[in-house]
Every structure is written in C-alpha cells, then in structure tokens.
Image (spheres, rainbow, N blue to C red):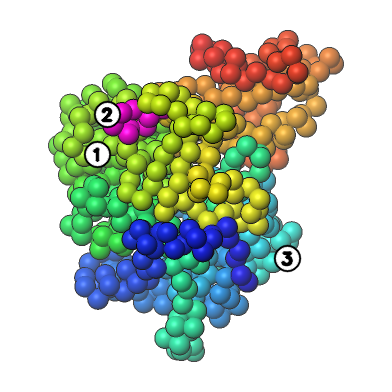
C-alpha cells in the first residue's frame, strides 16, 4: 500500500538545500550504535505492576528486531502497510518501530487509555493489518478488547498479545519462531528499504473537527528535529534519558524512543507514573535528562523535598504541555541541580521551541522558548498580516519538522503556499524571538499534556436522555494544566443530573476515563452570541472561579 502525503518536491528541495533533511532513517543510526557500542544497554524497562526491571543491550535488541521484522513480513505485512500497537513504555515499542522501518511499514502507536470508542475509528481508518497489545495493563483486559474489535475490522488480520500464553502470543508468534532462518533478511531489508520521505509514524491527534486525525511523519521530518534538539541541549552518548511519559505520545516517542538511538544512549522507561518509584529508578539508573508535562515536574519537585540526594543526577528537565508555575520552578531549584527548560510543540511538529540551557530560570516561567533551527514562527492578525512584537494573534509555524499530512485527509493539511501551518494557538513573540502561548483558538482542552477531543465528547454527551444543551471547557489546574468541566442545561422532564451519571454514560460508550468531565455544572441557559453560538470564553472564565 502506498501512503499518500502532502509533501511537495519544492519543500523537499528546500529542506535538503538547507541541510535540514539528510535522508537517514532510524535503522541507519541503529546500525551505527550496534557497531559502536553493541554491549551497551539500549533500553531498561521498569514495570510497576510486578516491580520488574528488564535490561536489553543494543546487540540483543538488534537480534530481536531482525526476528520481529522478518516475522511481521511472514504474517503478510507489506511495504507501506500500517502496524498498530497499544503499548505502554516497554522495550517492545522500540523494537516494533525499528522492525517496521526494516520492512518499510509505518508504526501507529495508540495511547493505552483508548477504548473501543476511539480504537474502532482509529484502527479502521488506518486499515491496520497487525495490532499488538498487552494481555492486561493497569487492571484492564486489552486482549479481550482487541479480539472483540477484530470482528468489526476486516483489515485487521492479526492481534498479538504480550503476556499471552495462547496462539496469539507476541512471544510465540514473533520471538520464539526463528523467522530469520526461513527468510533471507538481508535481501528482505534491502528490498524493503525506505527513503527519508516515506511515512514511518502515524499518530492520532484531536482537533477542531472532533474526530481524531492521523498525523504522518517521515524520517526526515522527525530527525530534522531530533538532531538540533540534541545539539541545543548538548546531549551525547554519556547521557541517560528517563522517560515516564507515554511512548505512544509524541513527546515520549521522540525523546524516549528516537533520541536515545540517535545519541547512542540508554533509555530508561517507567510504564506507569508513580512518583515514589520514579525516585528509586532515578537513584538506581542515574539519568541526566527527564522529559514530561507539568504534572511530572510537580511530582518530582515534591519528591525532591525529602529525596533530593537521590535525584542529583538530573541535570535537565524539559517541561511541555502547559505553562510552568513559578513556585514549581522555585521548589525544584531549591532541592535539585536540575535546569528546567520549557518547550512548546505539537504532534504535527514535535517541539518547535525550547528555552536555552543558559537562560535565566525565569525564562521557563514566562516564555515557551525560542524556535529550534530549521523552524520559524510568526504571529498574524485574522487577515494574515504579521503582527509586531508583543502583539497577540494566531500562531503559525513552518519548517523542517512539520508533518507531511493527515492520513487519508489531505484536505485538512491547512499549510499555505508559503509553507505556514496554522497551529490553532494564540501567542505573542518578544524582541528576542521568545514565544508565549496565550490561548487556543481551537476547541481543545489539554489535561496532563493530553489533548481531549471536545467535539467528539460533546457529540457523545448530546445522546444523554437528560441533557438539552452542553459545552465542555477547561478549568485551570495547577498539577494537570486543565481539567474538563461540563456545563449543561437539562430537558424539561429531567429533574437532576450528577457527575457520576455523566461519567457512567460515557463509560458505557467506552470513552476513556481521561476524556470524561471532572466537574459538572447544571445551568438554566448557556451564554450565547446574537447568532446563537455558545460563548465558551465566558464559560472558561466562570470555570476559573468554580471551587
């Protein structure tokens, strides 16, 4: 299958001429690190459910990747096909991505929080041939859900389950079968080799349309970000990266999966966020870099009050997803040697901006950083005219790390003839080029760094027999950035409605818990414009005052 993108010859030429795209793919970097430091730990996985620690060297991982790649080909995965996985932070995610690249397939990571409501749409759109899931994770039976979904997804030929003892076992099908003895892997990999412009990753993101969109990235778009990011932060093979953020999220994928390979470094993965266990992991593994959204920083700063000596290896913490409260920086600085950097980005382009390691700490509080090399920002008015310094307006981005389209939805790309992409955010730029995100023009709430698809959830809630009208908005939260607040009016024959009622209704429709409201406010009417549109900005202001 050929995956069609919005990449143009003109954009490719300009990025190659700029030196931003070098056409190297992750397996090129992988081969280099295996040859250079094959015995070094590639991935160390900590599973919170059983307290286990598993370490795999680059050399041993390489053998697994070869076998998995040959096995996927043996199962019928062709060049240009899509392999989906709903995994937490386990080494199998890294291995699957490398294996897919070896045989010219694209990996589609899916967040472990997704349930039938989200997955049926995503897997159906992707036409995934293979889905890899855990037997269970966080007390949820992913295996049963995946097999149930298979009945309604005719393109889904194989469900492979990590931890299963049956015929669907990931280990039994892909790892205990010596596929490389049946298939000439050298010939297979050579025949299936992809270019730097082939799609290697499809990640679903939520936007104003309500339904998820499949963001497509290539090796060129991803590594044109990874390389300058590593250079700006002065990272190298001696660094160890601690990643508790989900690998199925762009932040986790870029910096917990790809960055360590590029650096020839070790990735330390925690599969479920538990701050007290994170302290033990940091003490044991001595990572120098940690990345995550504000809640991770808040929890580590709190742990540092009593466990500061155990966290001294952390030299850098890159925080993205929400503004960093000043007291949080002060708390962390008091007990840690960690330099806190703020960043802003999207699934569509990775981190676009970061503060600089040499910046004063206040920069991370009051700005979201300056653009990385090979990317540009501009703030415009509604007519598209570039605004002057410190004026607020819609934020546009262009550059090397920009994605190459939405899967099967080329009309939604939105990039103009000059390469500018509308981010959906409102921002202002200062004289030094530092950006401050001031709001969002798109209808999305960000909870703990995760976008909540507002329109989709609203459409689902409109089916509730007691709800007449509703609007979902974000309520500011110091730890998670925002929590979801539902304003509803009731039908005439409805007397009461509780938050538990609303959440039970959504759970029955298999909507993930993280997408469900945490506040419910029943009102007589919603504020509207003269034309009848709900004025969500007024509700956002009201939500700030809600106890």
Q: From mark 1 to mark 3, how far is it between C-alphas? A: 49 Å
* Visible residue check, residue 265: yes
Q: Secondary structure at mark 2?
A: helix
Mark found first going from the N terminus, 1 or 2:
1
Identify the residue at image location x=59%, y=24%.
Answer: 473
Label disc, if present, on residue 363 of the rendered structure: 2
- Dot 3 corresponds to which residue? 154
Front of the two marks 2 and 3 = 2
Q: Residues within 10 Å of mark 1 (few under 14, many from 20)?
A: many
Q: From mark 1 to mark 2, how far is it between C-alphas? A: 9 Å
Quick check: is 267 in the magenta stretch? no
Identify the residue at image location x=36%, y=51%.
Answer: 374
400 vs 464, left or right, is left
- Do callouts 1 and 2 mark residues in contact (Cβ within 8 Å)? yes
The magenta stretch is 428-435
Quick check: is 433 in the magenta stretch? yes
Q: Secondary structure at mark 3?
A: loop
Q: Secondary structure at mark 1?
A: loop
Mark found first going from the N terminus, 1 or 3:
3
Find residue 107 and report its horizontal and vertical position in percent: 51, 62
| Residue extending farthest front | 385
Label disc, if present, on residue 356 of the rendered structure: 1
Q: From mark 2 to mark 3, how far is it between C-alphas? A: 51 Å
Mark found first going from the N terminus, 2 or 3:
3
* Visible residue check, residue 48: no
Q: Nearer the viewer, residue 239 or 195?
A: 195
Identify the residue at image location x=72%, y=34%.
Answer: 459
The secondary structure that dominates the magenta segment is loop
Identify the residue at image location x=41%, y=77%.
Answer: 66
């Amino acid at each position: 299958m050929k995956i069609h993108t919005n990449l143009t010859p003109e954009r490719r030429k300009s990025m190659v001429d700029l030196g931003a795209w070098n056409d190297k793919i992750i397996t090129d970097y992988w081969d280099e690190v295996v040859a250079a430091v094959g015995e070094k730990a590639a991935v160390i996985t900590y599973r919170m459910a059983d307290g286990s620690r598993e370490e795999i060297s680059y050399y041993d991982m390489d053998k697994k990747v070869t076998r998995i790649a040959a096995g996927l080909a043996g199962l019928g995965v062709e060049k240009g096909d899509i392999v989906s996985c709903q995994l937490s932070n386990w080494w199998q995610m890294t291995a699957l991505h490398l294996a897919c690249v070896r045989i010219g397939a694209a990996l589609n990571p899916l967040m472990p929080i997704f349930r039938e409501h989200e997955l049926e749409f995503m897997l159906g759109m992707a036409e995934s041939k293979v889905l890899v899931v855990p037997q269970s994770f966080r007390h949820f039976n992913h295996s049963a859900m995946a097999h149930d979904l298979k009945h309604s997804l005719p393109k889904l030929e194989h469900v492979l389950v990590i931890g299963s003892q049956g015929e669907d076992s990931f280990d039994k099908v892909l790892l205990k079968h010596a596929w490389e003895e049946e298939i000439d892997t050298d010939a297979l990999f050579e025949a299936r080799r992809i270019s730097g412009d082939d799609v290697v990753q499809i990640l679903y993101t939520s936007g104003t349309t309500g339904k998820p969109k499949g963001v497509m990235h290539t090796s060129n778009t991803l590594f044109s970000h990874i390389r300058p990011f590593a250079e700006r932060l002065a990272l190298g093979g001696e660094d160890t990266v601690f990643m508790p953020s989900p690998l199925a999220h762009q932040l986790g994928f870029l910096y917990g999966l790809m960055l360590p390979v590029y650096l020839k470094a070790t990735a330390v993965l925690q599969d479920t966020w538990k701050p007290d266990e994170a302290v033990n992991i940091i003490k044991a593994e001595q990572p120098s870099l940690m990345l995550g959204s504000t809640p991770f920083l808040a929890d580590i700063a709190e742990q540092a009050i009593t466990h500061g000596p155990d966290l001294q290896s952390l030299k850098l913490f890159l925080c993205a997803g929400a503004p960093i409260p000043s007291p949080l920086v002060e708390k962390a600085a008091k007990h840690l040697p960690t330099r806190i950097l703020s960043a802003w980005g999207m699934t569509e382009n990775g981190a676009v901006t970061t503060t600089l390691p040499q910046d004063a700490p206040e920069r991370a509080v009051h700005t979201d950083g300056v653009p990385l090399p090979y990317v540009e920002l501009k703030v415009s008015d509604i007519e598209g005219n570039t605004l002057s310094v410190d004026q607020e307006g819609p934020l546009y981005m262009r550059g090397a790390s920009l994605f190459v389209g939405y899967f099967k939805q080329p009309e939604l790309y939105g990039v103009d003839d000059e390469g500018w992409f509308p981010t959906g955010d409102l921002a202002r730029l200062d004289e030094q080029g530092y950006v401050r995100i001031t709001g969002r023009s798109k209808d999305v709430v960000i909870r703990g760094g995760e976008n909540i698809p507002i329109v989709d959830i609203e459409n689902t809630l409109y089916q509730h027999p007691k709800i007449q009208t509703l609007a979902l908005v974000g309520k500011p939260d110091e730890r998670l950035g925002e929590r979801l607040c539902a304003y509803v009016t009731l039908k005439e024959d409805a007397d009461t409605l509780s938050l538990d009622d609303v959440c039970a209704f959504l759970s029955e429709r298999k909507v993930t818990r993280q997408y469900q409201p945490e506040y419910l406010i029943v009102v007589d009417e919603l504020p509207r414009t003269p034309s009848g549109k709900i004025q969500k900005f007024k509700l956002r202001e009201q939500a700030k005052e809600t106890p």
